[in-house]
Amino acid sequence: MKYLHSMVRVHDLDATLRFFCEGLGLRETRRVDNAAGKFTLVFLTAPESPEAEIELTYNWDSIEDYGSARNFGHLAFRVDDIYATCAHLQAMGVTINRPPRDGHMAFVRSPDRISIELLQKCEARPPAEPWASMPNSGSW
């Protein structure tokens, strides 16, 4: 058996691609536009693990409420510098829901409220401001 991908439904494909590609550094590997079905599928991979994909499903006319995504759990990404990654996302307007106070783990949400766990590569970084004293925000 081979793991292929996880699928998440999105309402704003452009905002979601900005979050995952510009914010987290994922790459779009392929795209399928299906006019008859009125949907677009976009497949993304992380540079260090191109075999595992995230499938973004954008239903063109959907107004369905996809919920809070808490039942889905989260997607997790290892990052080289958790502080730099969080600062970059914050500069893009992303809320850091669970700041990396421990220098190891943070949580953010995509534009469609998909919970994203960020984990520091190798050992945890020493606690640093503004993260060390930043409170949690919302749910993650």
Image (spheres, grey):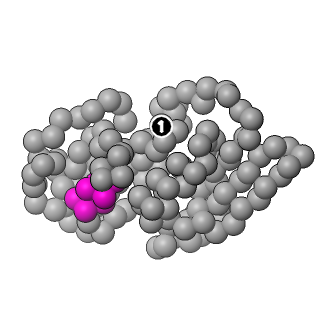
10 Å crowding of disc 1: few (<14), some (14-19), many (20+): some
**Which residue occupies 50% across, 29% down?**
68
**Which residue occupies 42% across, 42% down?**
109
Which amino acid does the dot numbered 1 rest on? Arg
Q: Tell me residue 35's x, y (percent).
A: 85, 49
- Looking at the rendering, the stretch of residues picked out in magenta corresponds to 83-89
Q: Left or right? Give the position of 1 relative to 81.
A: right
Q: Left or right? Give the position of 104 relative to 29.
A: left
Write down the residue under mark 1. 113
Which residue sits furthest right? 36
Q: Tell me residue 112's x, y (percent).
A: 52, 39
Along the line of sight, the residue nearer the viewer: 62 or 47: 62
Residue 56 visible, this angle: yes
**Which residue occupies 16% across, 62% down?**
125
Q: Tell me residue 78's x, y (percent).
A: 37, 62
Q: Is residue 85 shown in magenta? A: yes
In terms of secondary structure, what is the magenta stretch mainly? helix
For residue 88, what is the image quadrant? bottom left
Q: Is residue 39 shown in magenta? A: no
Q: Up-down: is 109 above or below 104?
A: above
Q: Secondary structure at mark 1?
A: loop
